[in-house]
Image: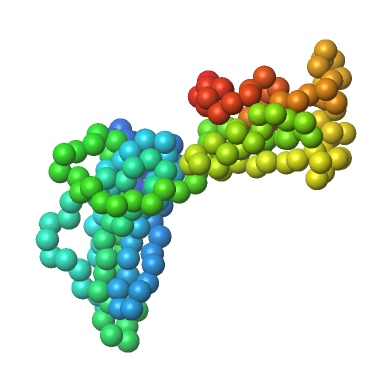
Amino acid sequence: MFKKLLFVLLFSASCTLLFSQERPIEIIEEAKANRLFLYALNKNEKDLDVLITVEGTNFRQSKSVPRPVRVPAASKVLLTNLIVERNKRANYTYKLQVSDSLSRRALQREFESIKIEPKKKVIVYIPENCSSCDTLVSNLDKSNYLYTSLHFSEKPELKEQLAPAFANSTVKIDSISTPIISLGGVLHVKIEDYEQLLEELNK
């Protein structure tokens, strides 16, 4: 038991020295006919090279030497597929090698963009007469970030909930015509466009 624990600790330490990503690569499977497709989800904001090694029973796979696959930031990419034996269920385990030192040998495959959580949770409160909210929300929709938008016109109680934050401010909540944006729980009233939002997110 001690030897196994020591091995796990040493293995974890070596992985950390090699590369410590903010969010681990997730592997999801999708079955189609007799094939099992394994995809990587990269929920980080940087491109990564991912090498997968699969072992198990009741399936066949390519006999060629595995190569790393480029998985761009905020994307889903096919890593490999298994040919499952008829009337059988694939029993498999996999090992991942993840690196941010991008290699020329990495396979470049088609990828699907995914939505990811930003470094700070984003909530956009939209006043009734907000002139810049539509553009900001449109740009957030086009981005890779998950966010929440709430309209005062649909939920009037939001004003009461936010009012205490403006109690000691010269700015009154009823007079605000720009987005009120919560970034990680901190309210901002001077962010009017997507570029300003990105600046605050990256601080």
Give how far across and how far down residue 106 sits, in percent.
19, 45
Q: Quadrant of residue 38?
A: bottom left
Quadrant location of the N terminus in the rendered image: bottom left
Q: How many marks?
A: 0
**Left or right placement of residue 124 versus residue 117 in this view:** right
Depicted 120 relative to depicted 64: above or below: above
Q: Quadrant of residue 86?
A: bottom left
Residue visible at 26% across and 51% down? 109
Q: Quadrant of residue 103?
A: top left
Give how far across and how far down residue 139 sits, in percent.
54, 36
Q: Nearer the viewer, residue 105 or 66?
A: 105
Residue visible at 68% across and 23% down? 188
Residue visible at 68% across and 41% down? 149
Residue visible at 40% across and 60% down? 28
Give how far across and how far down residue 53 sits, in percent.
24, 57
Looking at this rendering, what residue extends furthest in the top direction?
A: 170
Q: Nearer the viewer, residue 5 or 27?
A: 27
Depicted 152 relative to depicted 163: above or below: below
Q: Can you see residue 199?
A: yes
Q: Can you see residue 95?
A: no
**Left or right placement of residue 6 versus residue 114 in this view:** left
Depicted 79 relative to depicted 199: above or below: below
Looking at this rendering, what residue extends furthest in the left direction?
A: 64
Give how far across and how far down residue 134 sits, in percent.
64, 36
